[in-house]
Structures are given as structure tokens and as C-alpha cells.
Image: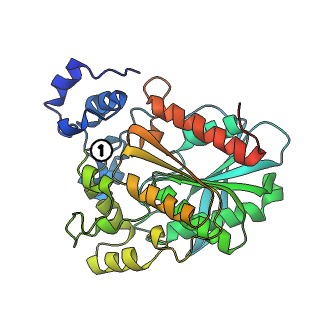
Amino acid sequence: MSGTYTTAVVEEKKNSRLSIPDKLLGGLDPEWVNLWEKHGSPMVRADELSLEEFRKSPAAYSFTYPTCPGPPVFHVEDIEIPVSQPAGKIMVRVYTPEGPGPFPVHLNFHGGGWVLGNLNSEAAWCRHMCNNAQIKVIDVDYRLAPEFPYPTSIYDSWDAVKWTITNASRLNIDPSSVSIGGLSAGGQMTAVIGHFARDHGVDLKLQLIIVPATDMRYCLRTRELNETTCPYESVLLYYDVPWGPLGREQWFLKYWLGDDDDTQERILTKDWICTPVLAPSFKNLGRAHIITAEFDLERDEGEFYGRLMQEAGNDVTFKRYPGMPHAFAHYNHPERGLSQSFVYIEDTSRLLREVHFGKRDE
């Protein structure tokens, strides 16, 4: 991995369709600049075409160059579980470390705008957590929109939490040592499920809330984007970044919430399970760690959500990863990934060891 923004890349950049604007180059991590300009800027993003077209050839419209399958783990098992809203079944993938157990357990809700993603999306991170933290990790393949629109994915993920606790003996886990987490859309669902858990007496060891979408009211297509309609500086600064602009979020919401402006406005402004910053109470929530990326339009809403939790008396910690784009955590290929992605892996595995085993690494 190279940390130098080379002259060759600068020259190449001039002809790239989705090149990084010059105004951003001073603060972005040079590794990310190199990766994006060489492998991301010529591509067509998913949100630049219909979902139907994307699904015909997902790899052609996904920036997967710096990702990898992840390390081997002791045991992996796929289990079909029941879900309720609407009734059906989903798959979960259970990663188990070597040892007798019972093990602590962490449930992961992958990103992808509630529209994209599957059990491969964050498999590498799940494998690292299983090995490094010595815990079971359950990755949840919740149902996606538009076939299963809002709020199905949220309730699928909550059903997976309840199923895990109910089946603790079968899974060889400790039902008193449960944590949850997710990235982007998964971070939004983690925030919501933290409230569900509190209201149902489930004591979570941690909510790992990663680059979350906690307040997307600025995505409403009927609103002009300005300082009056959007309180988040990061949105105003980065709404047009080539790797994850505002239009990409609006594309996700079109399929998750529906393509009707009135319906989107009603859900985004009235339903707190879509907009977690509107939750009726932030009291007595489980411990949380909020992860944000500096060059992400969702940065400030995630940090604002964390402050709301903190002001209500909850145990909340924060880390903003400098120079990073929204999905930096995915780019963990050992030869061509981002250094900050490996820092993230170490940070999160250390935190999960701490919350589940009650001790800090020296």
C-alpha cells in the first residue's frame, strides 16, 4: 500500500469520469486517493442506473478492488431462522472460534442502503472479530428492499437478536454477553435496535454504530439543500463527493421507502425508527461506540446521535477516522487495502474483547 499521491495518478485523474475534486485532495488520505483514482473513478456507481440493471451484474458497479474474503475461522455455519414482519425466513451465518464455550456473541447487520448487500459484504470483518476477539459472530442476512421495503429489514434484524438469545443453549453462547453492530444502513438499524433492546429488557454489552444514517431528512427531494434545511456541515461539504454523494442516499431511499415524495416525507419526519435522532427517549440505553469517517456526508449526523445518547446519561465513546470516505471499513485486502481499515479492525476487535471479557488490552 502506498501513501503517496503520485504524479502519474494526478495525470490519470484529469481523464477520469468520477475524479476527486481538487478542493478535497489536501485532506483526504493519500492511500484512498490512489485507490479511488486508479480503480474507482472510471466506474459506474450503482446509483447511476436502475436497481434492476445493477442486479444483472453487481460486480461491474461495485468498488470491490480493495476487499477480500477474510481469514479462516474455526467453524462457519448458515442457519435459517424465522422472522415475523412479514412472516418468513432469513439466513444467518454463525462464525465460531476454537474452544469449549459458551461464547459471547456479536450480531452484525451489514451495510448497503437496505437495498444491497448480503452475507459476503462484511464477511472479512466478521472473521477478524471471531478470531481476534474470540467471540461468536452472527451475520444477519435481513431481507432487502424493494421486495421487502421499510421497515422489514429493521424487524428482521431485531428478530435475529431475539432468536439468538432464545437459542443460546443450541448456539453455545452466553445470553448475558450480547453485542450488536452495523455499518451505514446497519448502523441505523443498530441504533434503532438499541432502543428495542432497552424496552424489552435485553442488556446489550455494546452498540457498535458505524458510519450510521441516523437523520436522512436532508435527503428529501422536495427540499433545497442549504444551511436552513440541513444542520449538518458534513452534508453541505461532501454532498457531491464522487464515491458517495447525496444522490446515492436518495437512490437507496427511493427503493427502501418508496418513490413517492409525500410517503418519504411522512416516514423521514415522523417515524423515529427511520430517523433515530427523533427517538422518544434516549434514557438507559446500552453502551455505544460511534464510528465516523472524516470525508463522509453522514459524519455529523452520526456524531450528533452519539451526543444525544451521551446527554441522556449513557456510556458513549467516539472515533472519527481521519481522511477516510464513508465505506473505508470495507477496504481490508491485506495487499491493497487501506491502513485505516486495519486500524479499524484492531480498534473494534479490542473493544469487543473488552466489553465481553471485562478487561482492556495492555
Residue 279, percent from left and from top: 51, 74
Asked if residue 53 can be seen in this view, the reply is: no
Quadrant of the image containing the N terminus? top left
Q: Residues within 10 Å of mark 1 (few under 14, many from 20)?
A: some
Determine whether, in the image, residue 106 is placed left or right of residue 230.
right
For mark 1, give the secondary structure: loop
Quadrant of the image containing the C terminus? top right
Asked if residue 276 can be seen in this view, the reply is: yes
Q: Looking at numbered disc 1 in the image, what kind of residue is underneath it?
A: Trp
- What color scheme is it? rainbow
Residue 26, percent from left and from top: 26, 32
Residue 130, percent from left and from top: 68, 40
> Can you say whether 321 is above or below 72 in the image?
below
Quadrant in the rendering for residue 322: top left
At 44% from the left and 29% from the top, the residue drawn is: 337
How many labels sit on residues?
A: 1
Determine whether, in the image, residue 198 is placed left or right of residue 122.
right
> Can you say whether 187 is above or below 218 in the image?
above
Q: Which residue is mark 1?
A: 243
At 58% from the left and 63% from the top, the residue drawn is: 157
* Front residue of 184 and 38: 184
